[in-house]
Image: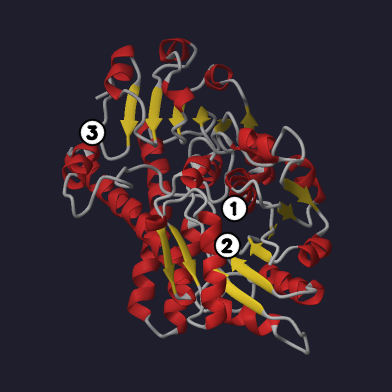
Amino acid sequence: MNGNIVCIGAGYVGGPTMAMIALKCPDRRVTVVDVNARRIAAWNSDKLPIYEPGLLEVVKQCRGRNLFFSTEIAKSIEENDIIFVAVNTPTKSFGHGAGYAPDLQYWEATARLIHDHAKSDKLVVEKCTLPVRTAAAMSRILHTGKSPYHFEVLSNPEFLAEGTAIADLENPDRVLIGADNTRTGHKALREIVAIYASWVPRRKILTANVWSSELSKLAANAMLAQRVSSMNALSALCEATDADITEVSRAVGMDTRIGSKFLQAGIGFGGSCFKKDILNLVYLCETYNLQAAAEYWRQVVAVNEWQQARFVGNIVRAMFNTISGKRLALLGFAFKADTGDTRESPAIKVSRLLAEEQAQVVVCDPQALENARADLADLGGRVRYEADPYAATLGADAVLILTDWNCFRDLDYARILGGMRKPAFLFDGRNCVDHEKLFSLGFNVYAVGKPARSHLQ
């Protein structure tokens, strides 16, 4: 084994992960390949295709030394013995399982590429999120025909949070590696463990069988998303009873059996993983005829979508039951702060619902405007886009905070209020600004799971 690595897939998982491996393992050559030439060109520039705090600095340290980005997939498969697979596995939009089963066409195409271009034995590491027992299917494809080479398939799911990916990679909660319980499986496991052991304490590197590793990724995301939907369901009850979701969250989170993470109410979860992975779990449960379990997990997604519709409903009711023709400034469009990623962002549905009510929607985000334009392209002139939050809010009837960017916390809200139509409304979908201060300035403040602070009552 030459110990050198290629990763097929230069997206949110492959790019940052390989950059960190290159940084921490300077003796290994790391190559990231992708069929998308524009994406590879961006990785080879100072304007990376994704925004992640600290990522550009890591890439600059390693690029051209032991980190390379290329479109030469076949050549890279031939030259490297360790192959990470980090291709996209979106939810199917057609055929059997449409709407919740994973679409594995890119994964299968990658497996066939590895089979066709390998010139030696390979370790193939699943890095993308895949349904349980996918490794067995990959192994069957790789060993199809009369290939003289051996392919050992391992599972190494990512547990990155966008916005903190570099910190998560440098100091992970854990690294999970799954391998077959065979002699060759154990040998391959030691090889992948050695990569991460270059900087991760051995106690944090967990080993398991392949199936447990694959399922653990789905289970982790499902449990995190379930906590978000649980708190959002409680937020509706808080609003109805004048309880405060922040106080409820604090009381619940201090129970050491539960903990405080992911107990914040808001407009719901987004991103490329949670919804997709929960629907994947639904599909698996239904495949094994576990209908009650399938419905349980399906409801986590349903509550998430209900929360977004409820948020818009509250806006309409607060603004005298009509927002037609009113200017609404949306501060934030990325699904979370410190990323430009808008996949499954709650802001997409909120924007569409507001446009259906014939509101004048203005979107403002420091990193996600280009993606927002693509997500809402079919709405045409019903949506405007402003990089400057003060320009976005000028003449607005209401401000909606949809992403908890730090820059939105620190805005001059007295200045914003002065430029708005009156009465001025602020709807905090992330509970991230000082509501009492905004109310004292003159805003009518509505937050998620909290009593309204309105001058109109």
- The amino acid sitting under disc 2 is Lys
Marked residue nearer the N-terminal end (2 or 1): 1
Give above or below for 88 relative to 147: above
Name the residue rendered at 42%, 78% in the picture.
285
Q: Residue 385 vs residue 263: left or right? A: right
> Where residue 244 sits in the image (x, y, percent)?
21, 37
> Where residue 428 sits in the image (x, y, percent)?
38, 32
For the C terminus, the quadrant is: top left
| Secondary structure under the numbered disc 1 in the rendered image | loop
For the N terminus, the quadrant is: bottom right
Disc 1 residue crowd, few under 14, some 14–19, many 20+, Cα 10 Å: many
Q: Residue 404 vs residue 369: left or right? A: left
> Where residue 75 sits in the image (x, y, percent)?
83, 62
Name the residue rendered at 51%, 62% in the picture.
193
Checking the image for residue 451, the label placed there is: 3
Q: Are marks 2 and 1 in contact (CB under 8 Å)?
A: yes
User: How far apart, in angstroms, are the residues tagged by discs 2 and 3?
Assistant: 44 Å
Which of the colour schemes (rainbow, by chain, secondary structure, one colour) is used?
Answer: secondary structure
Name the residue rendered at 78%, 89% in the picture.
146
Q: Which residue is mark 1?
A: 13
Give above or below for 40 relative to 435: below
Q: Which residue is mark 2?
A: 127
- The amino acid sitting under disc 1 is Val
Marked residue nearer the N-terminal end (2 or 3): 2
Q: Residue furthest bottom?
A: 146
Give above or below for 101 relative to 176: below
